[in-house]
Amino acid sequence: MASPLLGILDLDDVLVKFKVYDRYHGVALISLSVALMFEFVWYCNHVIVAEKVGYRCNEPNNISESSNTSYIPNSTVEWCKNLEACPEWVYDNPDSFVAEFQLACQDWKRTSVGSMHNIGYMFGLLTIGPSSDRFGRKTLVIITCVAGGTLGCMKSFVTSYWLYVALEFMEAAVGDPMSPVYMLAIEMVATKSRVTYSTTFMTGLGIGGIIFSFVSWLIPYWRTLLRVVYAPGLLAIFFIYLLDESPRWLLINGKKDEAVKIIKKAAKLNKMTMEENLNNISYEVNKGPSFASVIKDTFKSRSLLKRFFVCGIWWASATFVNFGLIVNSTLLGGNKHINFGLSAAMKSLGILFSAYIITKYHRKGPLIFCFVACAILCTGQPFLPKNLWLQISNYMVGLLLSCANFCIIYLFTSELFPTQSRNSMHALCSAVGRIGSILAPQTPLLMAYWSGLPTLLFGVVSLIAGLATLLVPDTADQSLPDTVYQAEKMEAQILTESRP
């Protein structure tokens, strides 16, 4: 808080004077929402691009009458056990991803596209997060968007499956803007506006998915579809003019003059008069710790180590359940594009729902509720009557809750760690969580054993994550900590205030 005696200003005292929907923050909001539209489409497009396609063996017609036909397979399953015996495979859609790469009887290769994307995403988070802490949020937003668009377009031209998978890995490793986008957004507004602002721009995820569902319906050929959804990412170069660096990041890296200049620019665009002397903003300067030192400091603090452990469970559970439900949504029955569009709509509704409950009921309680309620719906899914609308409705509500807890986790995690390591730790927690999203694309394969096995597994995992939430403090209405000491002090204060 500002000190009336010394004239010292806290950044929050300045940012609180800005309205998040005025001109300056409005332009940033739209730009960041567009970046998230790219992120969701790039992250999930393989659900449609590498979709399941029917196929059969084009059986030879010149079998000798003297041949022992008892050894000739009479079904696709039997032909798959004798791959070399089939002279040619016929696909229901000869222009599909599965047909062009000849993936008959190799379903694991199709589902591995999504897993490889998430492996790349895991590696990327370990570099993108620390790079964002070191070089700035805006810089990494631009680099990741342009890199993702470039590599995505390259994927549409390859003729080798393994080259496609390699590009999928590279795209995810260097072309995912989610982490720096989110950090830039929450650091450019005051504490009381974090929920409102982050919720609004994150609806771009769902909007991107809805648009993609219609575009994929209109453009059935997967190569053309990839070019259409990835090429716009190259336009992110214009973020150079549309976005400014995070004032909070600039201050903690000793660039007060640049931070003050940005705040004055924002005030001018909004036609505001700043009465405070912005040169009196006080901030603890961070000399830019290495990623290794960030991990060391975290592990030295029992409080932050516990938070990291819980956040790892959150992220692994949330990515496994949320991404798993999206991947399996196209297998529910009915139109796959509509189902995917509904999943994307649930993303936006889940974000809005999460904003309402965390504004009214803080962080911890809503997160526990969403995890447990999602667990109940997913566990009950296999035992519902065989009614398509009932099945889809229950499934979509479970997905809505899964999206809500994902949104809460994003905000909650960022509030648990100090500014000097926030993006690095957020990225590390998310990277650990990618174990869940790596496994999620493989869950459709479990349906070969029992159709209800994937959702039952989602329910169990959600319940475990809900129980783990009991171990961390509620960070609602608390200023973002800047150092390890402030983060520990915040937890001690919360625990003291919660005692009767």
Image (cartoon, rainbow, N blue to C red):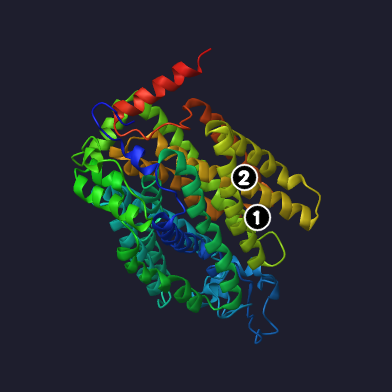
Q: Please tell me whether mark 2 sits on a helix, a strand or a loop.
A: helix
- In this view, the residue in front, 250 or 68, is 250
Is 8 displayed left or right of 111 in the figure?
left
Image coordinates for residue 136, horizontal then vertical, percent? 27, 51
Per the image, the residue denoted by label 1 is: 448
Mark 1: which amino acid? Ala
Count neighbours of disc 2 (C-alpha within 10 A) and say few if under 14, some if 14 to 19, many if 20 or more: many
Q: CA distance from mark 1 to mark 2?
A: 27 Å
Per the image, the residue denoted by label 2 is: 401
Query: Looking at the figure, which quarter contains the N terminus?
Result: top left
The correct choice, above or below, for 91 with respect to 437 in the image is below
The correct choice, above or below, for 362 with respect to 496 in the image is below
- In this view, the residue in front, 283 or 431, is 283
- In this view, the residue in front, 25 or 435, is 25
Q: Residue at x 35, y 23 (%)?
A: 489
Q: Please tell me whether mark 1 sits on a helix, a strand or a loop.
A: helix
- In this view, the residue in front, 138 or 251, is 251
Image coordinates for residue 246, horizontal then vertical, percent? 31, 49
Which comes sooner in the sequence, label 1 or label 2?
Answer: 2
Tell me if I can see residue 103 in this picture: yes
Q: Residue at x 57, y 43 (%)?
A: 354
Tell me if I can see residue 450 in this picture: no
Residue 266 figure quarter: bottom left
Image coordinates for residue 403, horizontal then vertical, percent? 57, 48
Image coordinates for residue 139, horizontal then vertical, percent? 28, 57
Q: Which mark is residue 291?
A: none
The correct choice, above or below, for 261 with respect to 461 in the image is below
Is 90 displayed left or right of 235 in the figure?
right
Residue 242 figure quarter: bottom left
Count neighbours of disc 1 (C-alpha within 10 A) and say few if under 14, some if 14 to 19, many if 20 or more: few
Residue 64 figure quarter: bottom right
